[in-house]
Image: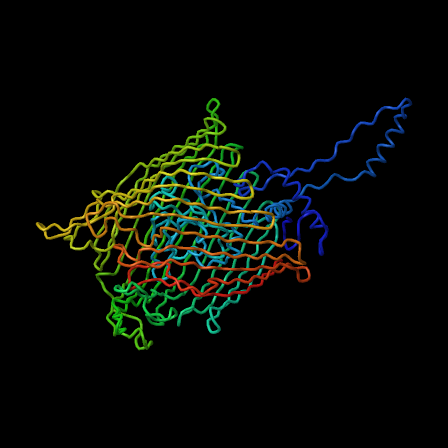
Amino acid sequence: MPAYLDGQPVDGRRTRGGKSRASLLIGAAVLLAESSSSTTIAQAQSALPPVTVEAPVQRPRPARASEQSPRRAQTATRQRSRTSSPAPTVPTLSERAAAEAAAQQAAKLGYRAMPSATTLRSGASPLNTSQAVNVVPEQVLKDQLPRNIDDALINVSGITQTNTLAGSQDAVIRRGFGDNRDGSIMRNGMPLVQGRSFNPAVESVEVLKGPASLLYGIMDPGGIVNTISKRPELYQHGSVTLLGSAYSASKTGADGLLDVTGPIGDQGLAYRFIGYGVSEDYWRNFGRHREMLVAPSLAWYGQDTTVQLNYEHREFIYPFDRGTAFNPVTKAPLAVPATRRLDEPFNNTWGTSDLIQASVEHRFNQDWKLYAGYSYNTETFSANQLRITGINFTTGNETRSNDGTQGSLSNVSYGTSYVSGGFWLGNMRNEVLFGGDGQYRTIYRDNLIRQATPPINVYNPIYGLIGPGTTVSNSDSAQTDKLGQWSLFFQDTLHLTERFALVGGVRYMDYDQIAGRGKPFIVNTNVSQDKVLPLGGAILKLTDELSLYASYTQSLKPNSTIAPLANSGGFVLGSNIAPEEGTQYETGLKFDNKRLSGTLAVYEVEKQNVLVSQFNPALGLNVYTTAGKARARGVEIDVTGRLTDSWAVIGSYGYTDARVTASQDLTLLGKKLQNVALNTASLYLVYDFGTALPGQLRLGGGARYVGDRPGDAINTFFLPSYVVADIFATYETRYEQFPVIYQFNVKNLFDKVYYPSAVNNLNVAVGDARRVSLSATVKF
């Protein structure tokens, strides 16, 4: 099936509007495909492949019986030199970049997974690694139009939502573990603290499953989510998109996106600028979402060195919506329309975030390269957070606390540098990675509002009788969590044969953490520790397209608390309290035939040293120990790619059995972990009509399934399972010389009422209602 670039099929045939420039790009694409067939995908992402055009070699003419005189021969030579065609021109950097884009376009439309080198810190093929990495490709994001990271990750197995802090934070559970602000969300392999990480500057999303502390340091054992930035490109192109959306006739909105990139001069320097704005009504009975993003970036692509610099500035305001409530007796949701909010119109979160990242990659030779990166991310926000404290489900009387947060500030400064390469040890190939990183992270909330407020009736609410709270609770304010860590890491993949390799690695980590709250400030956590973490694995390549792998990995996260421990007599978590540690055993199969790729994984994760309390009658206090354990075991299947020339697919299935296996609190022992579904599944298909129509028509749709989940830690109620379906259609045509793409999306096609997560029975998130959108994109 033909690839498309700027709306024109790249298959060697002439099209309307096809001119000499298109012919040059097609020719360069053919040269590129032939010259780079042996390069890996990771190499194609990090540097432009060389394209060499050589002049044809003249064959010597056979000597005649009667030779020409020297003078006549010289004259003939001069005439041939004047009339002969000049040697073909070597393609410029811009032409090579355009050819590369054309060569990759068909693969992108086919949902080809193209992993970033930043996730596993190397350019190794997924078949040559011992851990599972799932990719949500760029085209999937373009087709599905996810609104946040939760939306994007519906395509990945074993992932569910957890406490999003009323819709203001990314919060995803991976393999049974995860929370908001747990340090697991990355941009280009470097940590973020901003509440929402997904925006139009993100090109693709990758998930490294299981403990990832060897590469990323302090972490829960579920893994990391790596969002990959759009990068500057060396050929000039851009697009403008306008989108209109509606939840209903009275709940509408509009988005605008500008994305332009191209070269600066002809020495490998390129820029990109992304500008985005959205203003739309919230789907429930009040609220509005407004957001603005400005994201400029620069890159320099040298022969052996690549330099990247990107910046993002974001301003936002969106509803702070704690959702609905579940009846603790009937275990059913509150009997009110799903659109009815239980708080007040002033419940909003507003603020700004800034992200700056810089990286340098230098290739010493074909075997060795150096990478160095730095990232600084900060976010400030305030929020009105009126909270429900109780509901009489018979009378409808709702008691409330008029809470709020003023002056929240989070930031993280992170730097890493590492060398990767290979060498031969006898007949065995070694691929090594060694380096270090450092991080300093602060989460601070200045004034915490706590104010009593009159009740309302949820069955007949009258809003607007009160305003935001203003009473500062000094004992709850100045909430502070500071974490610093410094590490060295090493990993070696030893290829014993062409088909079998062993993997080993180690990280030495030194860390400090201080946490507490109050005005005056009271320290409740003061930890200074170090730790060595190992990694092991094995890879058996059954064929060039199929590999079997097994791995052992660990993770670490300090036990900490901002709030005072209940009834502890002022006990402070210190270095005498062991950190939470995660251990995972995993095995599975990976396949990749250059059209379709996927992973089948079987794993068991155990998290130990979980902080638990037990009342000591002699002391009259709670005694805190690290006797708690939790375990998750499961099976995961992920597939993405092209089934045929016309059909593309992305699908997943996850089985996750996660529960508490040790606790001195018998109400928790044996209970399933909160918000973790036993079964999850997704399947999305796309049909591409190719050149059967005047333009290019693509139709797609699918659904996701999430099984029932415990709504609280002691499993007193469960959120019901749900299936949500989505559809989309795109049509690409031309208006004069400009390619134009029209796209129609329906999210939650059947307007299903569902509940993706819960904090407790009075704080249950409600999934978005049906949303219809229509957009037009003009390329230039």
Q: Is residue 350 above or below residue 440?
A: below
Image location (x, y in percent) of residue 324:
33, 66
Quadrant of the snapshot with the C terminus: bottom right
In the image as oriented, which residue stretches furthest toward the left? 618
Image-based side of 15 in relation to 716, left or right: right
Q: Relative to residue 358, is residue 645 drawn left or right?
A: right
Above or below for 361 versus 253? above
Q: Is residue 91 left or right of residue 366?
A: right
Image position, residue 281 (x, y; %) = 44, 69
Residue 571: % across, % down: 17, 50
- Asked if residue 436 is positioned above or below residue 772 in the image, the reply reads above
Quarter-of-image position of residue 216 = top left
Q: In the displayed structure, does residue 232 sit left or right of residue 517?
A: right
Residue closer to the observer: 544 or 409 = 544
Instruction: Identify the residue shown where x is 62% and y is 60%.
Output: 740
Q: Nearer the viewer, residue 129 or 432?
A: 129
